[in-house]
Image (cartoon, rainbow, N blue to C red):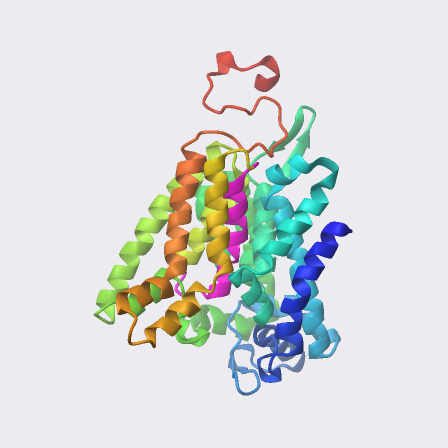
Amino acid sequence: MAGAGLLAASAAPLSWHYLGSYPQEHFQVDLEVYREGARALVTGFPLYDLRTTQPQFLPFTYPPFAAFTALPLLLAPFTVMGWIWTVVQFWLLWVTVGLAFRPFLSRFGARAPLAQGAVAASCVWMLPVAEGIRYGQVNAVVVTLCLWDVTRRRRTPGGRVWDGGSGIGVAFAAAVKLTPAVFWMHWAVARRWRVLAVSVASAALITVCTALVLPPASVAYWTDALLDPDRLGPNAGTSNQSLRGVVMRLSPVDGAAASVVWLVLVGAVLAGGFALSRRLDRLEQPVAIVAVVGLVAFLVSPVSWVHHMAWGVVVVGALLGDARERRRMAAALTVAALLWMRLPWWGANLLADPEVPRWAARLVQNSYPQLALLSLAALWWLVARAGRRDPGLDRLGVDDIDRPAAEQSPQGRQ
């Protein structure tokens, strides 16, 4: 209860700022998109023709299944649902912290929930989390589903064993928002064929069933809406922190040449990122895997808004580990501190100041892609290169992955 109280105390002023005193026309604008998508299903209005009310006029940009999951938003007035959804997001943050920081929290014994509340309270003020509250975003659901899925363990007579995940959580997340499908590429590279098959089959089943119920909407999405990134808003603005957004802001050329530059960068990130995630899979570091794949998805997606960096909470947990190594603790605190700052928006403001060098303003404006790349490097250097398994996995004989089998204990071999 004390841990939950810490989280509530930290969340209260932020919630009141964005839900109580914020201009009404900016109230939970993304949640309004989800709600209007659900309303379109009920009324029969074409899902991908709708626009929210002025002054936003936002379209529905998610797969058709997402509109089904939003149907409960119609059960109460919009303002009420906005507050309920905010509480749900904070609860999901609590769950995410419990999973991502498990090795660290386990050191507190019976006081682990209090420590969990303290960590979650600090994460509330990270810019991506705060922006998710501001807009009523779905990122908290996506991150929690993927983290729960990949870190899930099964019970065996010899203890609890991690076997790569279940695939179900990622399937549901990908059916709501496509970017989690990047985890399928990780499972393919890591040769986790069973998990991959379950996840792809589950997502395909959801998609096919949705298409049977909503054939026109499904055709419109998969042949038109999905292929039009401009539906999401101005791709070259500060809000788009993906590699493509950086290229669009910095590239002196337009069109095909800029696309080639972007694709080359995407290829490099995919190659390096999945090599790292495969290594972490062999080391049984599920939290670090989620951090790496989430960062890869953030970088390679054509559009990644600031709040899509919600993976940063998992990154901090993966870097921190059990907080017994000073280098990892310093890296985790550095990433957390950078996420507490409003760096992209500071950079946008600096661009308007003629006394600030333009290169310096651009450096700050494009801070999240740089942070993502540096975080990937830190995860390799501090976690993958060290060659140790996750101390949060309570399994016999998992201290040193690189020890020869002959040197392991009989219990470890069992």
Q: Is 309 a magenta residue?
A: yes
Q: Write down the quadrant of residue 7 in the picture.
A: bottom right
- Above or below 22: residue 284: above
Viewer can see residue 75: yes
Residue at the location (56% across, 51% down)?
Answer: 170
Q: Is 221 a magenta residue?
A: no
What residue span does the magenta drawing correspond to?
A: 301-322
- Report the magenta stretch's main SS: helix
- Locate residue 236, reporting x and y percent: 35, 72
Viewer can see residue 202: no
Quadrant that contains the C terminus? top right
- Locate residue 332, reporting x and y percent: 49, 45
206 or 293: nearer the viewer: 293
Residue at the location (27% across, 69% down)?
Answer: 358
Q: Residue furthest front?
A: 355
- Locate residue 407, reporting x and y percent: 50, 12
- Locate residue 244, reporting x and y percent: 34, 64
Q: Is residue 44 left or right of residue 364?
A: right
52 or 43: nearer the viewer: 52
Q: Residue furthest right?
A: 1
Residue at the location (76% across, 51% down)?
Answer: 2
Q: Is residue 120 left or right of residue 296?
A: right
- Above or below 138: residue 148: above
Q: How many marks?
A: 0
218 or 7: nearer the viewer: 7
